[in-house]
Amino acid sequence: MLFKHAFYENDDHSSVRLIGEYDALRFIFDYYKLKIYNSELDDPNFKLDFLLVSHYNNVSKQIGYLIKPGESQVNNLGYFMLNQKQFIKAEALFKLNITNYPLTANCYDGLGDLYLAKGDKLKAIESFKKTLSLKAIPETKQKLEALMKEKK
Protein backbone atom coordinates (compact mmCIF):
# COMPACT_ATOMS: atom_id res chain seq x y z
CA MET A 1 0.00 0.00 0.00
CA LEU A 2 1.39 3.39 -0.98
CA PHE A 3 1.13 6.35 1.30
CA LYS A 4 2.48 9.83 1.64
CA HIS A 5 2.67 12.16 4.59
CA ALA A 6 3.34 15.85 4.95
CA PHE A 7 3.89 18.28 7.79
CA TYR A 8 2.14 21.63 7.38
CA GLU A 9 4.16 23.93 9.60
CA ASN A 10 1.86 26.95 9.19
CA ASP A 11 -1.42 25.08 9.66
CA ASP A 12 -3.29 23.72 12.63
CA HIS A 13 -5.96 21.06 13.10
CA SER A 14 -8.76 23.13 11.57
CA SER A 15 -6.81 24.61 8.65
CA VAL A 16 -4.91 21.49 7.58
CA ARG A 17 -8.06 19.68 6.43
CA LEU A 18 -8.49 21.59 3.19
CA ILE A 19 -4.88 21.49 2.07
CA GLY A 20 -4.58 17.88 3.26
CA GLU A 21 -7.60 16.82 1.20
CA TYR A 22 -6.22 18.64 -1.82
CA ASP A 23 -2.84 16.94 -1.47
CA ALA A 24 -4.51 13.57 -0.91
CA LEU A 25 -6.55 13.89 -4.10
CA ARG A 26 -3.46 14.89 -6.08
CA PHE A 27 -1.64 11.85 -4.67
CA ILE A 28 -4.48 9.40 -5.34
CA PHE A 29 -5.12 10.71 -8.88
CA ASP A 30 -1.48 11.41 -9.83
CA TYR A 31 -2.03 9.65 -13.18
CA TYR A 32 -4.71 12.12 -14.26
CA LYS A 33 -2.57 15.15 -15.11
CA LEU A 34 -1.68 15.29 -18.80
CA LYS A 35 1.90 16.30 -19.47
CA ILE A 36 2.73 17.81 -22.86
CA TYR A 37 6.23 19.16 -23.26
CA ASN A 38 7.25 22.06 -25.50
CA SER A 39 9.56 19.72 -27.39
CA GLU A 40 6.53 17.56 -28.26
CA LEU A 41 4.58 20.59 -29.41
CA ASP A 42 7.50 21.80 -31.53
CA ASP A 43 8.29 18.40 -33.10
CA PRO A 44 6.23 18.11 -36.32
CA ASN A 45 6.56 14.30 -36.19
CA PHE A 46 5.27 13.91 -32.63
CA LYS A 47 1.77 12.41 -32.59
CA LEU A 48 -0.19 14.55 -30.13
CA ASP A 49 -3.39 12.70 -30.95
CA PHE A 50 -1.78 9.39 -29.89
CA LEU A 51 -0.49 10.97 -26.69
CA LEU A 52 -4.01 12.14 -25.81
CA VAL A 53 -5.63 8.82 -26.67
CA SER A 54 -3.02 6.87 -24.71
CA HIS A 55 -3.25 9.17 -21.70
CA TYR A 56 -7.04 9.06 -21.51
CA ASN A 57 -7.09 5.29 -22.09
CA ASN A 58 -4.84 4.98 -19.03
CA VAL A 59 -7.05 7.34 -17.03
CA SER A 60 -10.13 5.34 -18.08
CA LYS A 61 -8.47 2.11 -17.02
CA GLN A 62 -7.52 3.57 -13.63
CA ILE A 63 -10.94 5.08 -12.96
CA GLY A 64 -12.96 2.21 -14.38
CA TYR A 65 -15.04 4.03 -16.99
CA LEU A 66 -14.45 5.84 -20.27
CA ILE A 67 -12.88 9.29 -20.10
CA LYS A 68 -12.34 11.05 -23.42
CA PRO A 69 -10.07 14.02 -24.06
CA GLY A 70 -12.12 17.17 -23.57
CA GLU A 71 -13.53 18.69 -26.74
CA SER A 72 -12.27 22.18 -25.91
CA GLN A 73 -8.86 20.85 -24.84
CA VAL A 74 -8.36 19.08 -28.18
CA ASN A 75 -9.84 22.00 -30.10
CA ASN A 76 -7.44 24.44 -28.43
CA LEU A 77 -4.48 22.18 -29.21
CA GLY A 78 -5.70 21.84 -32.79
CA TYR A 79 -5.85 25.60 -33.25
CA PHE A 80 -2.47 26.00 -31.60
CA MET A 81 -0.99 23.55 -34.11
CA LEU A 82 -2.86 25.31 -36.94
CA ASN A 83 -1.36 28.65 -35.88
CA GLN A 84 2.07 27.01 -35.82
CA LYS A 85 1.46 25.79 -39.40
CA GLN A 86 1.70 22.19 -38.23
CA PHE A 87 -1.19 21.12 -40.42
CA ILE A 88 -0.74 17.35 -40.04
CA LYS A 89 -0.93 17.57 -36.26
CA ALA A 90 -3.84 20.01 -36.39
CA GLU A 91 -5.79 17.76 -38.76
CA ALA A 92 -5.21 14.71 -36.56
CA LEU A 93 -6.45 16.63 -33.52
CA PHE A 94 -9.55 18.02 -35.22
CA LYS A 95 -10.38 14.54 -36.56
CA LEU A 96 -9.88 13.05 -33.08
CA ASN A 97 -12.45 15.54 -31.81
CA ILE A 98 -14.88 14.51 -34.56
CA THR A 99 -14.38 10.85 -33.64
CA ASN A 100 -15.08 11.57 -29.97
CA TYR A 101 -17.81 14.20 -30.44
CA PRO A 102 -19.44 13.55 -33.85
CA LEU A 103 -22.50 15.65 -33.05
CA THR A 104 -20.61 18.75 -31.93
CA ALA A 105 -20.59 21.48 -34.56
CA ASN A 106 -17.44 23.13 -33.27
CA CYS A 107 -15.37 20.05 -34.15
CA TYR A 108 -16.26 20.34 -37.84
CA ASP A 109 -15.73 24.09 -37.79
CA GLY A 110 -12.14 23.60 -36.63
CA LEU A 111 -11.52 21.11 -39.41
CA GLY A 112 -13.00 23.60 -41.88
CA ASP A 113 -10.64 26.30 -40.64
CA LEU A 114 -7.73 23.92 -41.14
CA TYR A 115 -8.77 23.18 -44.73
CA LEU A 116 -9.25 26.87 -45.35
CA ALA A 117 -5.72 27.59 -44.07
CA LYS A 118 -4.36 24.85 -46.33
CA GLY A 119 -6.21 26.29 -49.33
CA ASP A 120 -8.49 23.25 -49.75
CA LYS A 121 -11.68 25.19 -50.32
CA LEU A 122 -13.84 22.20 -51.31
CA LYS A 123 -13.10 20.36 -48.06
CA ALA A 124 -13.55 23.61 -46.10
CA ILE A 125 -16.99 24.07 -47.68
CA GLU A 126 -17.90 20.48 -46.82
CA SER A 127 -16.81 20.93 -43.19
CA PHE A 128 -18.59 24.24 -42.78
CA LYS A 129 -21.80 22.77 -44.24
CA LYS A 130 -21.58 19.92 -41.75
CA THR A 131 -21.04 22.44 -38.95
CA LEU A 132 -24.13 24.39 -39.92
CA SER A 133 -26.21 21.21 -40.22
CA LEU A 134 -25.54 20.65 -36.52
CA LYS A 135 -25.74 24.22 -35.22
CA ALA A 136 -26.26 27.69 -36.61
CA ILE A 137 -22.98 29.51 -35.98
CA PRO A 138 -22.96 33.01 -37.55
CA GLU A 139 -19.18 33.09 -38.06
CA THR A 140 -19.25 29.73 -39.85
CA LYS A 141 -22.11 30.89 -42.03
CA GLN A 142 -20.06 33.94 -43.03
CA LYS A 143 -17.04 31.79 -43.87
CA LEU A 144 -19.18 29.45 -45.96
CA GLU A 145 -20.91 32.31 -47.80
CA ALA A 146 -17.53 33.89 -48.64
CA LEU A 147 -16.26 30.59 -50.00
CA MET A 148 -19.40 30.05 -52.05
CA LYS A 149 -19.03 33.54 -53.60
CA GLU A 150 -15.43 32.75 -54.55
CA LYS A 151 -16.54 29.48 -56.09
CA LYS A 152 -18.87 31.22 -58.56
Image (cartoon, rainbow, N blue to C red):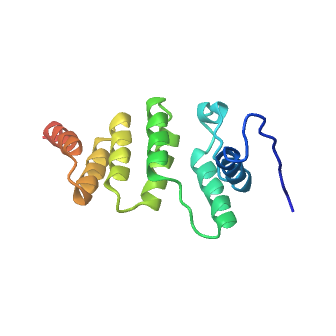
Q: Position of residue 114 (x, y in %)?
A: 38, 40
- Of residues 76 and 4, the one nearer the viewer is 4
Q: Position of residue 100 (x, y in %)?
A: 47, 60
* Residue occupying image coordinates x 63% and y 33%: 43
Q: Is residue 129 left or right of residue 98?
A: left
* Residue occupying image coordinates x 71% and y 48%: 20
* Residue occupying image coordinates x 65% and y 54%: 55
Count the numbered circles shown.
Answer: 0
Q: Is residue 141 left or right of residue 58?
A: left
Q: Position of residue 95 (x, y in %)?
A: 45, 53
Q: Is residue 56 above or below residue 141?
A: below
Which image quadrant for residue 58? Answer: bottom right
Q: Is residue 128 left or right of residue 114?
A: left
Name the residue furthest right: 1
Q: Is residue 124 above or below residue 99?
A: above
Q: Position of residue 150 (x, y in %)?
A: 17, 36
Q: Quadrant of the N terminus?
A: bottom right
Q: Is residue 10 above or below residue 112?
A: above
- Of residues 23 and 115, the one nearer the viewer is 23
Q: Quadrant of the C terminus?
A: top left
* Residue occupying image coordinates x 47% and y 38%: 87
Q: Is residue 8 above or below residue 98?
A: above
